[in-house]
């Protein structure tokens, strides 16, 4: 949303939809941690999976939103910033790395750092590419 839209509509609708989306995304992430809890000294698979899935969904979402159709001005802040921002958790990723390193598992922490970065970037890129190919294939 650009400055002209902020002047026209105000910032509060955006704040409201980001907040609502963030609550949904954070609740989903918390649910994932309850379904698949990680022991304090274990590899943080749940956080890795949440971040990779969130990045893949972002790749699909951004292609659909920016290349396929015109959508409501609040959809991007609601879903992209709110839901997916609340769902993905790169702050927990950083804390997990610090915990692993401080607990004497530096190699695991470094492996987790690299694996998450590569998997998240790969997920967003491959999901966006696959979505573009699918859209191009389905167009008459």
Image (cartoon, rainbow, N blue to C red):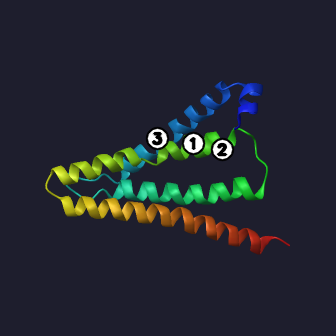
- Real-space Cα separation, disc 3 to disc 1, in angstroms: 12 Å
Q: In which quadrant of the rendered view does residue 21 lie? A: top right
Decide: marks 3, 2 in contact (CB < 8 A)?
no
- Real-space Cα separation, disc 3 to disc 2, in angstroms: 17 Å
Residue at 43% of width from left, 65% of height from top? 119
- According to the picture, the residue beneath numbered tag 2 turns out to be 76
Camera-near label (3 vs 2) is: 2
User: Which badge, 1 or 2, is on the more N-terminal residue?
Assistant: 2
- Real-space Cα separation, disc 1 to disc 2, in angstroms: 7 Å
Q: Mark 3 Cα within 10 Å, few/some/many (few <14, many 20+)?
A: some
Up/down of 13 relative to 38, above or below? above
Name the foreground residue: 137 vs 4: 4
Residue 94 lies, in percent from the top left, at: 33, 48
Decide: marks 1, 2 in contact (CB < 8 A)?
yes
- According to the picture, the residue beneath numbered tag 3 turns out to be 26
- According to the picture, the residue beneath numbered tag 1 turns out to be 81
Name the foreground residue: 24 vs 51: 51
Question: Viewed as shown, does residue 16 lie left or right of 68?
Answer: left
Residue at 81% of width from left, 70% of height from top? 139
Question: Viewed as shown, does residue 133 lie left or right of 127?
Answer: right
Residue 26 lies, in percent from the top left, at: 46, 41
Up/down of 23 relative to 101, above or below? above
Question: Viewed as shown, does residue 73 lie left or right of 100?
Answer: right
Residue at 51% of width from left, 57% of height from top? 55
Q: In terms of secondary structure, where does tag 2 sit? A: helix
User: Which badge, 3 or 2, is on the more N-terminal residue?
Assistant: 3
């Amino acid at each position: 949303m650009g400055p002209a839209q902020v002047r026209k509509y105000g910032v509060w609708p955006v704040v409201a939809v980001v907040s609502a989306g963030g609550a949904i995304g954070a609740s989903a992430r918390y649910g994932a941690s309850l379904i698949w809890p990680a022991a304090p000294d274990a590899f943080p698979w749940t956080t890795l999976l949440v971040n990779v899935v969130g990045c893949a969904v972002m790749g699909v979402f951004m292609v659909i939103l920016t290349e396929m159709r015109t959508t409501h001005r609040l959809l991007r802040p609601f879903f992209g910033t709110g839901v997916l921002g609340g769902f993905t958790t790169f702050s927990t990723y950083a804390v997990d790395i610090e915990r692993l390193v401080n607990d004497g598992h530096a190699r695991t922490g470094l492996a987790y750092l690299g694996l998450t970065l590569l998997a998240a970037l790969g997920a967003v890129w491959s999901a966006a590419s696959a979505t573009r190919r699918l859209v191009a294939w389905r167009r008459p």
